[in-house]
């Protein structure tokens, strides 16, 4: 039996309780929300957005499949010479500005997140871990955040297009 989808109201209420620094705003589509707030990685504070919308039949927008997290500032800095994960680690590359690409926080094919889960209890903690791994990657060129890649050639495709 499938678990029940959490309502937007339940998601907003949980975020307000667990992460009061996040302010909800009306999302870009119906039955959606975007939160804006600050999270700290290893040393810096990042301003991020989390966009989420309830599943809608016939719509495959990424934010309706899973929470979409973006770092708004400071901007992610591509490193084409990084030892691993060049030019940016664990993101869903999205042109025209790859610095705003959604973060890859979990493995969707492994069922690590679904709409019955609270974003405040999953996505926010995963984002903090991603930010810490990103700061380490900035310093060393090595990604310690784990994960796997669906298409290992994506980074080179992006590099060749730049």
Image (cartoon, rainbow, N blue to C red):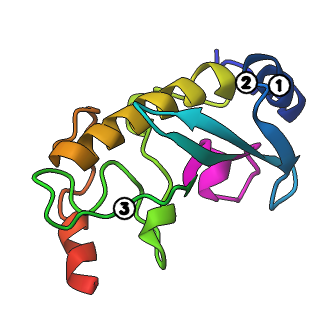
Any part of residue 121 in sight: yes
Q: Quadrant of residue 117?
A: top right
Q: Residues within 10 Å of mark 1 (few under 14, many from 20)?
A: some
Vertical order, 129 against 95 (above or below): above
| SS type, badge 2 | loop
The label shown at residue 19 is: 2
Mark 3–mark 2 Cα distance, whole angstroms, equals: 26 Å
Residue 67 rendering spot, x and y as whole percentages: 62, 42
**Residue 150 appears left or right of 25:** left
Mark 1–mark 2 Cα distance, whole angstroms, equals: 6 Å
| Residue 28 shown in magenta | no
Q: Are marks 1 and 2 in contact (CB under 8 Å)?
A: yes
Q: Quadrant of the N terminus?
A: top right
| N-terminal label among 3 and 2 | 2
Q: What residue is shown at x 74% (from left), y 18% (from top)?
A: 18
Q: Would you name the residue on which mark 1 appears?
A: 16
Task: Please state which of residues 78 and 148 is positioned toward the viewer in this rendering.
Answer: 78
Q: What residue is shown at x 13% (from left), y 64% (from top)?
A: 81
Q: Quick one: which residue is furthest to the front in this view?
A: 43
Q: Quick one: which residue is furthest to the left in this view?
A: 83
Residue 35 rendering spot, x and y as whole percentages: 75, 43
Q: Would you name the residue on which mark 3 appears?
A: 77
Q: What residue is shown at x 53% (from left), y 24% (from top)?
A: 125
| SS type, badge 3 | loop
């Amino acid at each position: 039996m499938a678990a029940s989808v959490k309502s937007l109201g339940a998601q907003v209420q949980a975020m307000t309780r667990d992460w009061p620094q996040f302010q909800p705003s009306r999302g870009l589509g119906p039955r959606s929300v975007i939160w804006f707030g600050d999270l700290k990685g290893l040393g810096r504070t990042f301003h991020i957005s989390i966009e989420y919308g309830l599943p809608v039949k016939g719509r495959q927008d990424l934010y309706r499949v899973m929470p979409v997290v973006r770092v708004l500032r400071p901007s992610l800095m591509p490193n084409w010479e990084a030892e691993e994960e060049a030019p940016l680690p664990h993101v869903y590359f999205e042109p025209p500005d790859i610095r705003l690409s959604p973060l890859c926080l979990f493995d969707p094919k492994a069922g690590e997140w679904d709409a019955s889960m609270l974003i405040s209890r999953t996505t926010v903690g995963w984002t903090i871990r991603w930010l810490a791994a990103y700061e380490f990657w900035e310093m060393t060129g090595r990604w310690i955040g784990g994960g796997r890649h669906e298409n290992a050639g994506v980074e080179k495709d992006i590099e060749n297009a730049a």
